[in-house]
Amino acid sequence: MTDRTAVRTGLLTVDGATLHHEVRGEGPLLVMMPGGSADAGIYDAIAADLADRWTVATFDPRGYSRSALAGPVTDQSPATHADDIVRLIESLSPDGAPAALFGSSSSAVVALAALARHPGRLSRVVAHEPPVVALLPDPEAGRALFAAVREAFRRDGVAAAMTTMAAGLAPEEGEAAPGPERAAAGSEQSAAAEEPPTPEQTAERAATGDQAPDPEQAATGDQAPAPEQAATGEQAPTAEQAATFRRMHANLPVFLEHVLCPFSGYVPDLVALKASAAHLVVGVGRDSRALLPAVAAEGLARRVGAGVAEFPGGHIGLTEHPRAFAARLRDVLAAP
Protein backbone atom coordinates (compact mmCIF):
# COMPACT_ATOMS: atom_id res chain seq x y z
CA MET A 1 0.00 0.00 0.00
CA THR A 2 1.44 3.36 -1.00
CA ASP A 3 1.58 6.34 1.34
CA ARG A 4 -1.01 8.80 0.03
CA THR A 5 0.91 11.71 1.56
CA ALA A 6 4.20 10.81 -0.13
CA VAL A 7 5.36 13.65 -2.37
CA ARG A 8 6.32 13.16 -6.01
CA THR A 9 8.20 16.15 -7.38
CA GLY A 10 8.72 17.19 -10.97
CA LEU A 11 9.71 20.00 -13.32
CA LEU A 12 7.54 21.21 -16.19
CA THR A 13 8.83 23.44 -18.96
CA VAL A 14 6.36 26.17 -19.93
CA ASP A 15 6.75 29.24 -22.09
CA GLY A 16 9.52 31.27 -20.46
CA ALA A 17 9.86 29.27 -17.25
CA THR A 18 10.29 25.87 -15.60
CA LEU A 19 7.71 25.02 -12.93
CA HIS A 20 8.57 23.01 -9.84
CA HIS A 21 5.53 20.99 -8.80
CA GLU A 22 4.63 18.46 -6.11
CA VAL A 23 1.96 15.76 -6.27
CA ARG A 24 0.30 13.71 -3.52
CA GLY A 25 -2.48 11.14 -3.41
CA GLU A 26 -4.67 9.51 -6.02
CA GLY A 27 -8.01 10.31 -7.60
CA PRO A 28 -9.35 13.29 -9.56
CA LEU A 29 -6.82 16.06 -10.03
CA LEU A 30 -6.93 19.09 -7.73
CA VAL A 31 -4.46 21.91 -8.40
CA MET A 32 -3.81 24.28 -5.48
CA MET A 33 -2.23 27.62 -6.41
CA PRO A 34 -0.26 29.60 -3.80
CA GLY A 35 -0.91 33.32 -3.48
CA GLY A 36 1.13 36.28 -2.29
CA SER A 37 4.80 35.32 -2.09
CA ALA A 38 4.06 31.69 -1.20
CA ASP A 39 5.08 28.53 -3.00
CA ALA A 40 4.06 24.87 -2.91
CA GLY A 41 5.23 24.49 0.68
CA ILE A 42 2.36 26.59 2.04
CA TYR A 43 -0.04 23.76 1.18
CA ASP A 44 1.84 20.87 2.79
CA ALA A 45 -0.69 20.30 5.59
CA ILE A 46 -3.81 20.86 3.47
CA ALA A 47 -2.55 18.75 0.57
CA ALA A 48 -1.82 15.86 2.91
CA ASP A 49 -5.37 16.07 4.31
CA LEU A 50 -6.98 16.06 0.86
CA ALA A 51 -4.77 13.39 -0.70
CA ASP A 52 -7.15 10.63 0.41
CA ARG A 53 -9.65 11.69 -2.25
CA TRP A 54 -7.76 13.76 -4.81
CA THR A 55 -4.47 13.79 -6.64
CA VAL A 56 -3.33 17.09 -5.14
CA ALA A 57 -0.85 19.11 -7.18
CA THR A 58 0.91 22.15 -5.74
CA PHE A 59 3.64 24.20 -7.37
CA ASP A 60 5.89 27.24 -7.21
CA PRO A 61 4.61 30.00 -9.54
CA ARG A 62 6.96 31.14 -12.27
CA GLY A 63 9.74 33.34 -10.93
CA TYR A 64 9.28 32.10 -7.35
CA SER A 65 11.43 29.71 -5.32
CA ARG A 66 12.28 26.66 -7.44
CA SER A 67 10.44 27.76 -10.63
CA ALA A 68 13.08 29.60 -12.60
CA LEU A 69 12.38 32.09 -15.36
CA ALA A 70 14.17 31.78 -18.68
CA GLY A 71 14.93 35.52 -18.61
CA PRO A 72 14.75 38.52 -16.28
CA VAL A 73 11.66 39.00 -14.13
CA THR A 74 9.10 41.46 -15.47
CA ASP A 75 5.55 42.39 -14.49
CA GLN A 76 3.51 39.22 -14.30
CA SER A 77 0.18 38.54 -16.00
CA PRO A 78 -2.72 36.51 -14.59
CA ALA A 79 -3.35 35.23 -18.12
CA THR A 80 0.19 33.85 -18.40
CA HIS A 81 -0.08 32.19 -15.00
CA ALA A 82 -3.46 30.74 -16.02
CA ASP A 83 -1.88 29.22 -19.11
CA ASP A 84 0.82 27.72 -16.88
CA ILE A 85 -1.93 26.04 -14.86
CA VAL A 86 -3.47 24.50 -17.96
CA ARG A 87 -0.09 23.16 -19.06
CA LEU A 88 0.32 21.60 -15.61
CA ILE A 89 -3.16 20.07 -15.81
CA GLU A 90 -2.43 18.66 -19.24
CA SER A 91 0.80 17.09 -18.00
CA LEU A 92 -0.84 15.51 -14.94
CA SER A 93 -4.17 14.61 -16.56
CA PRO A 94 -3.19 13.43 -20.06
CA ASP A 95 -6.53 11.67 -20.58
CA GLY A 96 -8.19 15.09 -20.79
CA ALA A 97 -10.21 14.80 -17.59
CA PRO A 98 -10.95 18.26 -16.14
CA ALA A 99 -9.34 19.28 -12.87
CA ALA A 100 -10.52 21.16 -9.81
CA LEU A 101 -8.65 24.38 -9.08
CA PHE A 102 -8.17 26.33 -5.86
CA GLY A 103 -6.56 29.75 -5.50
CA SER A 104 -6.40 32.28 -2.70
CA SER A 105 -5.80 36.04 -2.94
CA SER A 106 -3.52 36.78 -5.91
CA SER A 107 -3.76 33.17 -7.08
CA ALA A 108 -7.57 33.45 -6.92
CA VAL A 109 -7.16 36.09 -9.64
CA VAL A 110 -5.31 33.45 -11.67
CA ALA A 111 -8.19 31.05 -11.01
CA LEU A 112 -10.62 33.53 -12.56
CA ALA A 113 -8.39 33.98 -15.60
CA ALA A 114 -8.03 30.21 -15.99
CA LEU A 115 -11.79 29.64 -15.87
CA ALA A 116 -12.42 32.42 -18.38
CA ARG A 117 -9.70 31.21 -20.77
CA HIS A 118 -9.91 27.42 -20.39
CA PRO A 119 -13.35 26.44 -19.04
CA GLY A 120 -13.23 22.97 -20.60
CA ARG A 121 -10.20 21.98 -18.52
CA LEU A 122 -11.78 22.82 -15.15
CA SER A 123 -14.49 20.93 -13.27
CA ARG A 124 -14.75 23.30 -10.29
CA VAL A 125 -12.91 26.50 -9.42
CA VAL A 126 -12.74 27.87 -5.87
CA ALA A 127 -11.47 31.46 -5.84
CA HIS A 128 -10.86 32.58 -2.25
CA GLU A 129 -10.92 36.38 -1.87
CA PRO A 130 -9.44 37.57 -5.18
CA PRO A 131 -8.47 41.23 -4.58
CA VAL A 132 -9.85 42.47 -7.91
CA VAL A 133 -10.18 46.21 -7.38
CA ALA A 134 -12.28 46.68 -10.53
CA LEU A 135 -15.19 45.06 -8.65
CA LEU A 136 -15.02 47.32 -5.59
CA PRO A 137 -17.56 50.09 -4.97
CA ASP A 138 -14.60 52.50 -5.28
CA PRO A 139 -12.03 50.91 -7.62
CA GLU A 140 -9.74 53.94 -7.58
CA ALA A 141 -9.32 53.66 -3.82
CA GLY A 142 -8.22 50.05 -4.21
CA ARG A 143 -5.76 50.92 -6.96
CA ALA A 144 -4.35 53.73 -4.82
CA LEU A 145 -3.87 51.38 -1.89
CA PHE A 146 -1.85 48.82 -3.81
CA ALA A 147 0.10 51.53 -5.61
CA ALA A 148 1.02 52.94 -2.19
CA VAL A 149 2.25 49.51 -1.11
CA ARG A 150 4.46 49.19 -4.18
CA GLU A 151 5.79 52.71 -3.71
CA ALA A 152 6.61 51.96 -0.06
CA PHE A 153 8.55 48.92 -1.21
CA ARG A 154 10.46 50.90 -3.82
CA ARG A 155 11.30 53.65 -1.36
CA ASP A 156 11.82 51.84 1.96
CA GLY A 157 11.83 48.07 1.33
CA VAL A 158 9.80 45.00 2.23
CA ALA A 159 9.01 45.80 5.87
CA ALA A 160 7.61 49.22 4.98
CA ALA A 161 5.51 47.74 2.19
CA MET A 162 3.99 45.10 4.47
CA THR A 163 3.26 47.72 7.14
CA THR A 164 1.57 49.85 4.50
CA MET A 165 -0.48 46.86 3.41
CA ALA A 166 -1.62 46.11 6.94
CA ALA A 167 -2.49 49.76 7.59
CA GLY A 168 -4.54 49.99 4.42
CA LEU A 169 -6.45 46.76 4.82
CA ALA A 170 -7.18 46.57 8.54
CA PRO A 171 -10.44 48.48 9.22
CA GLU A 172 -10.60 50.79 12.19
CA GLU A 173 -13.35 50.46 14.77
CA GLY A 174 -16.66 51.42 13.25
CA GLU A 175 -15.26 51.51 9.72
CA ALA A 176 -16.92 49.25 7.17
CA ALA A 177 -14.03 49.04 4.74
CA PRO A 178 -10.43 50.21 4.53
CA GLY A 179 -9.18 53.20 2.61
CA PRO A 180 -5.89 54.08 0.91
CA GLU A 181 -5.28 57.17 3.01
CA ARG A 182 -4.34 54.95 5.97
CA ALA A 183 -1.91 53.08 3.72
CA ALA A 184 -0.09 56.29 2.89
CA ALA A 185 0.07 57.19 6.57
CA GLY A 186 1.32 53.71 7.42
CA SER A 187 4.08 54.05 4.82
CA GLU A 188 5.29 57.35 6.28
CA GLN A 189 5.23 56.08 9.84
CA SER A 190 6.43 52.51 9.36
CA ALA A 191 10.12 53.04 9.99
CA ALA A 192 9.55 54.95 13.23
CA ALA A 193 6.33 53.44 14.56
CA GLU A 194 7.13 49.74 14.40
CA GLU A 195 10.11 47.48 14.73
CA PRO A 196 10.47 45.77 11.34
CA PRO A 197 9.35 42.13 11.37
CA THR A 198 11.84 39.35 10.96
CA PRO A 199 12.13 37.80 7.48
CA GLU A 200 10.17 34.78 8.65
CA GLN A 201 7.37 36.91 10.14
CA THR A 202 7.17 39.03 7.01
CA ALA A 203 7.05 35.96 4.80
CA GLU A 204 4.33 34.27 6.81
CA ARG A 205 2.22 37.43 6.69
CA ALA A 206 2.46 37.43 2.92
CA ALA A 207 2.04 33.70 2.63
CA THR A 208 -1.26 33.54 0.84
CA GLY A 209 -2.29 37.06 0.22
CA ASP A 210 -1.89 40.72 0.17
CA GLN A 211 -2.21 41.59 3.87
CA ALA A 212 -0.86 40.85 7.30
CA PRO A 213 -2.76 38.45 9.58
CA ASP A 214 -5.66 39.74 11.58
CA PRO A 215 -4.32 41.31 14.80
CA GLU A 216 -6.44 39.03 16.93
CA GLN A 217 -5.01 35.90 15.33
CA ALA A 218 -4.08 33.47 18.07
CA ALA A 219 -2.46 30.08 18.15
CA THR A 220 -4.99 27.29 17.91
CA GLY A 221 -4.80 23.57 17.69
CA ASP A 222 -5.24 23.53 13.92
CA GLN A 223 -2.83 26.37 13.13
CA ALA A 224 0.54 25.69 11.55
CA PRO A 225 3.41 26.69 13.85
CA ALA A 226 4.70 30.19 13.16
CA PRO A 227 8.27 31.42 13.60
CA GLU A 228 7.26 33.89 16.31
CA GLN A 229 5.82 31.00 18.32
CA ALA A 230 9.25 29.45 18.34
CA ALA A 231 10.74 32.70 19.64
CA THR A 232 8.42 32.62 22.65
CA GLY A 233 9.07 29.00 23.50
CA GLU A 234 5.96 27.58 21.89
CA GLN A 235 5.88 24.95 19.18
CA ALA A 236 8.77 25.52 16.78
CA PRO A 237 8.40 25.29 13.01
CA THR A 238 9.66 22.15 11.36
CA ALA A 239 12.70 22.29 9.13
CA GLU A 240 10.39 22.14 6.10
CA GLN A 241 8.27 25.04 7.38
CA ALA A 242 11.34 27.13 8.12
CA ALA A 243 12.62 26.50 4.59
CA THR A 244 9.23 27.53 3.17
CA PHE A 245 9.30 30.79 5.17
CA ARG A 246 12.79 31.58 3.91
CA ARG A 247 11.77 30.99 0.29
CA MET A 248 8.64 33.12 0.74
CA HIS A 249 10.69 35.98 2.13
CA ALA A 250 13.03 35.76 -0.85
CA ASN A 251 9.99 35.94 -3.16
CA LEU A 252 8.58 39.11 -1.59
CA PRO A 253 10.43 41.61 -3.82
CA VAL A 254 9.04 39.90 -6.92
CA PHE A 255 5.54 39.87 -5.45
CA LEU A 256 5.59 43.50 -4.36
CA GLU A 257 7.15 44.86 -7.55
CA HIS A 258 5.80 42.58 -10.28
CA VAL A 259 2.66 40.77 -9.03
CA LEU A 260 0.68 42.90 -6.57
CA CYS A 261 -0.45 45.74 -8.86
CA PRO A 262 -0.86 43.76 -12.11
CA PHE A 263 -2.92 41.08 -10.39
CA SER A 264 -5.09 43.37 -8.25
CA GLY A 265 -5.64 45.51 -11.34
CA TYR A 266 -6.82 42.57 -13.44
CA VAL A 267 -10.24 43.07 -15.01
CA PRO A 268 -12.10 39.74 -15.13
CA ASP A 269 -13.99 38.61 -18.22
CA LEU A 270 -17.41 38.76 -16.60
CA VAL A 271 -19.20 37.41 -19.68
CA ALA A 272 -17.03 34.29 -19.75
CA LEU A 273 -17.27 33.83 -16.00
CA LYS A 274 -21.04 34.19 -16.05
CA ALA A 275 -21.19 31.47 -18.70
CA SER A 276 -19.17 29.19 -16.38
CA ALA A 277 -20.73 30.32 -13.09
CA ALA A 278 -22.01 26.81 -12.33
CA HIS A 279 -18.36 25.73 -11.97
CA LEU A 280 -17.25 28.70 -9.86
CA VAL A 281 -17.38 29.08 -6.08
CA VAL A 282 -16.21 32.34 -4.54
CA GLY A 283 -14.67 31.93 -1.09
CA VAL A 284 -14.71 34.55 1.66
CA GLY A 285 -13.17 34.44 5.13
CA ARG A 286 -15.44 34.36 8.13
CA ASP A 287 -13.31 37.03 9.82
CA SER A 288 -12.49 39.24 6.83
CA ARG A 289 -15.78 39.96 5.11
CA ALA A 290 -15.45 43.73 5.61
CA LEU A 291 -12.00 43.86 4.04
CA LEU A 292 -11.14 44.75 0.45
CA PRO A 293 -10.49 41.23 -0.94
CA ALA A 294 -13.74 39.80 0.43
CA VAL A 295 -15.76 42.85 -0.68
CA ALA A 296 -14.36 42.42 -4.19
CA ALA A 297 -15.03 38.67 -4.09
CA GLU A 298 -18.67 39.07 -3.13
CA GLY A 299 -19.06 41.76 -5.78
CA LEU A 300 -17.76 39.26 -8.33
CA ALA A 301 -20.18 36.58 -7.17
CA ARG A 302 -23.13 38.95 -7.56
CA ARG A 303 -22.03 40.08 -11.01
CA VAL A 304 -21.61 36.59 -12.48
CA GLY A 305 -24.13 34.59 -10.44
CA ALA A 306 -21.58 32.35 -8.69
CA GLY A 307 -22.06 30.70 -5.32
CA VAL A 308 -20.34 32.03 -2.19
CA ALA A 309 -18.77 29.81 0.47
CA GLU A 310 -17.52 31.03 3.84
CA PHE A 311 -14.18 29.63 5.04
CA PRO A 312 -12.61 29.60 8.52
CA GLY A 313 -10.41 32.53 9.52
CA GLY A 314 -9.67 35.63 7.54
CA HIS A 315 -7.89 36.40 4.31
CA ILE A 316 -5.07 34.02 5.24
CA GLY A 317 -7.37 31.44 6.79
CA LEU A 318 -5.55 28.56 5.14
CA THR A 319 -2.46 29.31 7.24
CA GLU A 320 -4.40 30.36 10.34
CA HIS A 321 -6.52 27.19 10.45
CA PRO A 322 -5.18 24.72 7.87
CA ARG A 323 -7.08 21.64 9.02
CA ALA A 324 -10.43 23.41 9.38
CA PHE A 325 -9.80 25.16 6.06
CA ALA A 326 -9.06 21.83 4.39
CA ALA A 327 -12.28 20.35 5.79
CA ARG A 328 -14.31 23.23 4.43
CA LEU A 329 -12.58 23.01 1.05
CA ARG A 330 -13.34 19.30 0.96
CA ASP A 331 -17.04 20.02 1.41
CA VAL A 332 -17.04 22.72 -1.27
CA LEU A 333 -15.25 20.53 -3.80
CA ALA A 334 -17.44 17.51 -3.11
CA ALA A 335 -20.75 19.40 -3.27
CA PRO A 336 -23.00 18.47 -6.21
Image (spheres, helix red, strand yellow):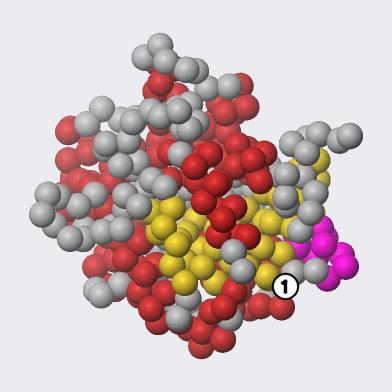
Q: Position of residue 29 (x, y in %)?
A: 74, 58
In-image side of 62 versus 27 (left or right): left
Q: Alpha-carbon neighbours of circle 1 within 10 Å: few (<14), some, or many (≥20)?
A: many
Query: Toward which corner of the image does residue 71 lie, by quadrant?
Result: bottom right
Q: Residue 129 at what x, y percent from top left?
A: 42, 60
Which residue is located at x 43 percent, y 67 percent? 308
Residue 162 appears in the figure = yes
Identify which residue is drawn at 57% across, 28% down: 241
Q: Name the residue: 42% across, 15% down.
A: 234
Part of the protein shown in magenta: 88-96
Tell me which amino acid carries mark 1.
Arg
Where residue 122 sits in the image (x, y, percent)? 68, 70
- Please name whichever residue, 49 or 38, is drawn nearer the observer in this view of the structure: 49
Quarter occupied by the N terminus: top right
**Looking at the image, which is closer to me, 307 or 293?**
307
Q: What residue is disc 1 on? A: 121
For this orientation, the residue located farthest to the left is 174
Residue that extends furthest to the front in the rendered view of this protein: 336
Residue 126 appears in which quarter of the rendering?
bottom right
